[in-house]
Amino acid sequence: MTQLTTPTKSSTDTAAFDADYNAAINAAGVRVLNGRALVRVVGDDRVSFFHGMCSADVKGSVPGSVLAALILTEHAHVIADLFIWVTDDALLLDIDADAWTRARAHLEHLLVADDVEFEDVSDCSVIDIEGPGAHEAARVIGGEVAGSLATWRSVSVGSIRIANLPRVGARAASIIAPQTEVDSIVARLLSSIPDSRRIGPATLEALRIENGIAGIGVDTTDKTIALEARLDRAISMNKGCYLGQETIERATARGGLKKRMFGIRFDGRPATAGTVLSLDGKEVGRVSSAIRSPRFGAIGLAILHHSAWRPGTELKTDDGTAIVTDLPFK
């Protein structure tokens, strides 16, 4: 007689992760981002103030734009990353809640006589939809205009706002909705998109790592320069003066970067964060993010010394080897 065994927690978790990942790659993975803060910025000086305080071209944007942006120190060290939803009468900040605490203190310290006010939008939540079904999901909720949005564009539909927003670098849509409507929106998405499902945070982490999107405070420290972490999508190279611009321009014009983030392929299990990576007996970086990807195997991210930038370079870890690869993973 065959004895049936109960799956261990790890095997159950792995099966759930694989199912979530499959939905996000082949259909639609839906997650309510409860850790995001939404902040409405109003006042006549909101555009000029934020143009000078972040790396995005706020002055060059139009209503309906969504901007990836960084708040930097004067030395271009990263304080926070965020998305700015531009509307007719406000800038809507979409930012990690913990990062907003730091960013708000930084911004308010620099407010002098500017007509700028921050209003916490505590009655709304962000819904992220990852995968090829994201556009159809936007169409289900917001109609044809929402389903045909260009990347980095948004539209208001009644009480909600929908964007074509590659939040972690993959095809995706985002919905900002009143909290009272979130459950019904998610239920409608799951019933309308074949093979869709709610996904866990590990799937978003896998997509982020695969696409080479640095996690602030994970792949960066308070001394990391934005360009070292490949945060280029959030940096306008054509805008006017902003805090941190001089360091960014010097690093760009003179090729002054000595460190940069690359992908790492491990020869076994993903290494733990903090694992030392060595080349010819010298430390060239440390693993900052790592995960098992169903598509790419054991992979991670690390900011490496320029001596290790060539893809294919073999690095040593405490108990194995790791191969440098460019980003995104392919």
Image (tube, helix red, strand yellow):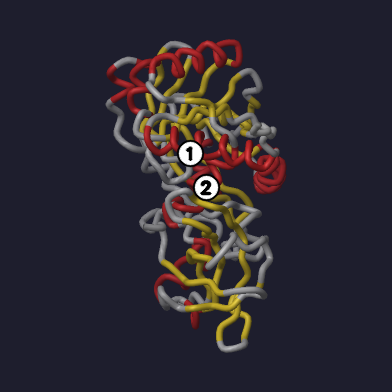
Q: Is residue 309 left or right of residue 79?
A: left
Callout in the foreground (1, 2): 1
Crowd around label 1: few <14 · some 14–19 · many ≥20 (10 Å): many
Where is 190 relative to 256, above or below? above
State the SS at label 1: helix
Q: Are marks 1 and 2 in contact (CB under 8 Å)?
A: yes
Residue drawn at (40%, 54%) of the image:
236
Residue drawn at (49%, 78%) of the image:
314
Amino acid type at circle 1 is Tyr
Q: Between residue 92 and residue 323, name the one nearer to us.
A: 323
Where is 1 relative to 191, above or below? below
Q: Between residue 55 and residue 109, name the one nearer to us.
A: 55
For residue 146, say whether it is visible: yes
Q: Between residue 229 and residue 72, name the one nearer to us.
A: 229
Can you tell which quarter of the image residue 280 is in? Answer: bottom right
For residue 64, say whether it is visible: no
Viewport quadrant of the C terminus: bottom left
- The mark that comes first in sequence, 1 or 2, is 1
Distance between the alpha carbons at the discs numbered 1 and 2: 8 Å
The numbered dot on residue 206 is: 2
Residue drawn at (32%, 15%) of the image:
143
Where is 298 relative to 53, above or below? below
Q: Is residue 96 left or right of residue 146?
A: right
Q: Residue 319 at x, y = what percent?
A: 65, 74
State the SS at label 2: helix
Viewport quadrant of the N terminus: top right
Where is 321 relative to 299, above or below? below
Amino acid type at circle 2 is Ala
Residue occupied by mark 1: 21
Q: Residue 35 at x, y = what percent?
A: 65, 34
Can you tell which quarter of the image residue 173 is in? Answer: top left
